[in-house]
Structures are given as C-alpha cells and as structure tokens.
Amino acid sequence: MESDTQGCNVPTPTRPYWIPDGVDFGNLPHDLQVAITSIVAPAYKELVLGAAPGLAQSTGVTIVHSLWLEIQDQFAIAQSGQQPDSEEDASKDRATQVGRLLRTIKAKDNASKFWVRLHEFRERYGTLPGSLDPIRRQFADEE
C-alpha cells in the first residue's frame, strides 16, 4: 500500500517499525500473541495507519509503542513472579519493573490525552494552528 505524502510515494508500513523483521510470531508465548493481535494490532491500525499524516500519526505511534512496552513489562513482571530468586532480590527487581511499568503507563496516558485534544481541536476548527484554512489553501494552490 502506498501513501502520497506531499508528492512523495512512501510505502505504508504494515507493522510497527519497532518490531524487528525477523520476529517469528509463532514462537512468541501464546498470551503475547493474543495481546498483539487483540490489543496492539488494532491500536496500530486505528491510531497510526488510520490517522492523518504528521502530528496525529506521530502521537499515535507514541501511544502504540507505549502500549507495546506496557504489555512487555506486564509479561516480565508476571514471569519474574515465577522465578525462584531470593526474596529480597526478587522484591527489588519487581519494584524496579513496576516503577518502569507505571512510568510507561503515565507516558501513554499523557500522549493519549494530547491525541484527544488534537482531535477535538481539529473537529472544532478544522485545521491545526499554522495550517491554511480552506479559503487560504485555495489561493495558495493557485500560485
């Protein structure tokens, strides 16, 4: 699928760029496969592939990448609970992991709030600040 971004034909990615090409989906843990297909993939389609180019897509990428990191952290925390480490070490590791998870969730929440404000602004005014409104755009196209 191709998209035209200001006269340049750019291939539209079919998967998030932060997931390496060589990842064998079938070798991932089943629960992670379910999370990817039921959460990450639909969010990527909606917030990145379905978004307007530029700021909306960039914000969508931030949200979906944060979601991906959040899911990975959740899996890591779940797996660390099954490791037979010393109780003190396990507690410190879990605290570090939970702290990172909470920071990721906060970053995702902040990006999501910005995404909502961006869409509300576009719905209300039709353009972003600095963009040409439809009347001015008509005259700019004639030049």
Image (cartoon, grey):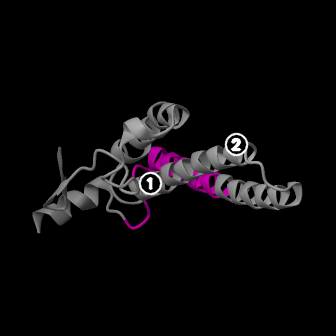
Residue 47's disc is none
Amino acid type for the residue under numbered disc 2: Ala
- Nearest the eye: 48 or 56: 48
Where 28 falls versus 92 (above or below)?
A: above
Q: Main secondary structure of the magenta part?
A: helix
- Nearest the eye: 138 or 41: 41
Q: Magenta region: which residues?
A: 106-130
Residue at the location (82% across, 61% down)? 89
**Mark 1 crowdedness (10 Å alpha carbons): few <14, some 14-19, many ≥20:** many
Q: Quadrant of the C terminus?
A: bottom left
* Residue 42 in the image, given as x and y percentages of width and height: 43, 35
Give the image quarter of residue 111: bottom right
* Residue 28 in the image, given as x and y percentages of width and height: 46, 40
Residue at the location (67% across, 52% down)? 105
Element assignment for label 1: helix
* Residue 139 in the image, given as x and y percentages of width and height: 18, 62
Q: Which residue has dot 1 on it?
A: 61
**Mark 2 crowdedness (10 Å alpha carbons): few <14, some 14-19, many ≥20:** few
Give the image quarter of residue 128: bottom left
Q: Is residue 97 visible?
A: yes
Where 43 falls versus 111 (above or below)?
A: above
The residues bearing labels 1 and 2 have C-alpha atoms spaced at a distance of 26 Å
Residue at the location (48% across, 30% down)? 38
* Residue 93 in the image, given as x and y percentages of width and height: 77, 60
Q: Is residue 117 visible?
A: no
Q: Quadrant of the N terminus?
A: top left
Q: Earlier in the sequence, mark 1 or mark 2?
A: 1
Q: Which residue has dot 2 on it?
A: 78
Residue at the location (64% across, 56% down)? 104
Which of discs 1 and 2 lies nearer the camera? The answer is: 2
